[in-house]
Amino acid sequence: SLLDFSRCSSRPPQEAAAPRARVLERLMSGPMHTAVHRGRFVLLALFFAALGLCVWQVANISPPSSTAVQLLPESHVVERYETWKQDFAEEDSSEMFVVWGLTPGDTGDHNNPELVTDLLADLDWDPSSREAQRWLLDFC
């Protein structure tokens, strides 16, 4: 050919060494390949039999009897709240406590839910005026 420079080299041409096949290629090209190829229809039948068995088992699962799902133990604060909320919704009458003279605030430890917060008194709250007494009377 016109651009063949192989004759210009003083070294003789070397034969390229064939790359060695990887372990998986050697395994799958030998007896394993023959076994899989010969037994492919048996493997396909076993696969569909297992698939059918799984579908049959899924069809036998009964749906849940209720929509209530309890993921936490009964003693957990979230589960106790859910129970309290359901009990509160079922009662026809319930007690309610209204407290005046407090300011909102959280003085508890945010990383330890066992420690409770302190009540913060509102020092500006004065129920002794006539307007405050009338409002409290109308509220009740």
Image (cartoon, rainbow, N blue to C red):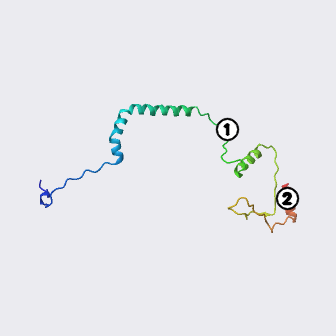
User: Which picture quadrant has residue 114?
Assistant: bottom right
Mark 1 and 2 residues: CB-CB less than 8 Å, in contact? no
Identify which amino acid the numbered label 1 is placed on.
Answer: Ser
Image label count: 2
> Image height check: is 104 above or below 91?
below
> Image height check: is 45 above or below 89?
above
Which residue, given by chain and number where applicable, does mark 2 sit on? 136
Tell me the crowding category of disc 2: few under 14, some 14 to 19, or many 20 or more residues within 10 angstroms, Cα based. Answer: few
**Label drawn at residue 66:** 1
Q: Is 29 on the left-hand or right-hand side of 64?
A: left
Along the polypeptide, which appears first: circle 1 or circle 2? 1
Q: Is 82 on the left-hand or right-hand side of 27?
A: right
Q: Look at the numbered disc 1 and give the secondary structure of its residue.
A: loop
Of badges 1 and 2, nearer the viewer stands 1
User: How far apart, in angstroms, are the residues tagged by discs 1 and 2?
Assistant: 45 Å
Residue at the image point whose x is 47% and y is 31% from the top: 49
| Quadrant into which the C terminus falls | bottom right
Image spot of residue 129 (x, y percent): 87, 65
> Image height check: is 44 above or below 1?
above
Identity of the residue furthest to the bottom in this view: 123
Residue at the image point whose x is 87% and y is 61% from the top: 133
| Closer-to-camera residue (78/137) | 78
Image spot of residue 126 (x, y percent): 84, 66
Q: Look at the numbered disc 2 and give the secondary structure of its residue.
A: helix
